[in-house]
């Protein structure tokens, strides 16, 4: 991944937009790193090349932070779920880099509370104050 124009560019030469917060955090981190590498996550041994795996770094990061181990892919599931609260399926599909809209369902976590809230809103719209039992 390369870092430029407030986007992360994947090795396949496709931009991955960043939020303002993500851009600022990564920019600051890159300054602190003091690396001239064009990559967001350069290889510690070969700074002119990107890292090839995050497994070792992920395990070490969790250990240093005192966080019990969980698969890094859980972050992808959380991202998909949270984005689905506010974005249409086409945006989620693009953000997740899925070729099929059906793939999203495997990543999207249970949405029991969101379904309950939507049902409450629907009841409120249809029944107004009569939606509650005295």
Image (spheres, rainbow, N blue to C red):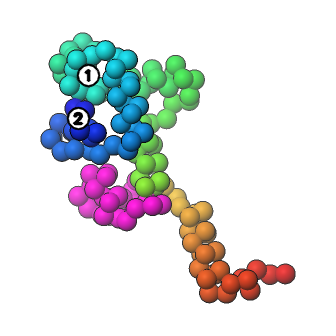
Horizontal side of 131 relative to 107 (left or right) equals right
Write down the region rendered in magenta. 84-108
Q: Who's the residue at 31% across and 52% down the image? A: 95
Gap in angstroms between the C-alphas marked 2 and 1:
14 Å
Callout 2 environment at 10 Å: few (<14), some (14 to 19), or many (20+)? some
Q: Mark 1 and mark 2 in contact (Cβ < 8 Å)?
A: no
From what the image shows, is residue 26 above or below residue 101? above
Using the rendered view, name the quadrant where residue 48 is placed.
top left
Q: Position of residue 23 (x, y in %)?
A: 36, 36
Circle nearer the N terminus (2, 1): 2
Q: Which of the labelled discs sits on residue 4, or is there none?
A: 2
Tell me the residue at 38%/25% (across/down): 28
Residue 11 lies, in percent from the top left, at 17, 36
User: Which residue is labeled 1 in the image?
Assistant: 42
Q: Position of residue 93 (x, y in %)?
A: 30, 58
Q: Residue furthest top?
A: 45
Secondary structure at numbered mark 2: strand
Q: Main secondary structure of the magenta part?
A: helix
For residue 72, above or below residue 88: above
Question: Toward the viewer: 6 or 78?
Answer: 6
């Amino acid at each position: 991944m390369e870092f430029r124009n407030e986007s992360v560019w994947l090795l396949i030469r496709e931009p991955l937009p960043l939020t303002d917060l993500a851009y600022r955090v990564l920019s600051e981190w890159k300054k602190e790193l003091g690396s001239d590498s064009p990559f967001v996550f350069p290889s510690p041994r070969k700074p002119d090349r990107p890292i090839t795996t995050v497994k070792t770094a992920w395990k070490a990061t969790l250990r240093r932070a005192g966080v019990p181990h969980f698969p890094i892919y859980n972050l992808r599931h959380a991202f998909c779920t949270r984005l689905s609260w506010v974005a249409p399926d086409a945006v989620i599909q693009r953000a997740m880099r899925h070729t099929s809209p059906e793939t999203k369902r495997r990543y999207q976590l249970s949405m029991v509370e969101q379904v309950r809230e939507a049902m409450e809103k629907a009841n409120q719209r249809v029944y107004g104050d009569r939606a509650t039992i005295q």
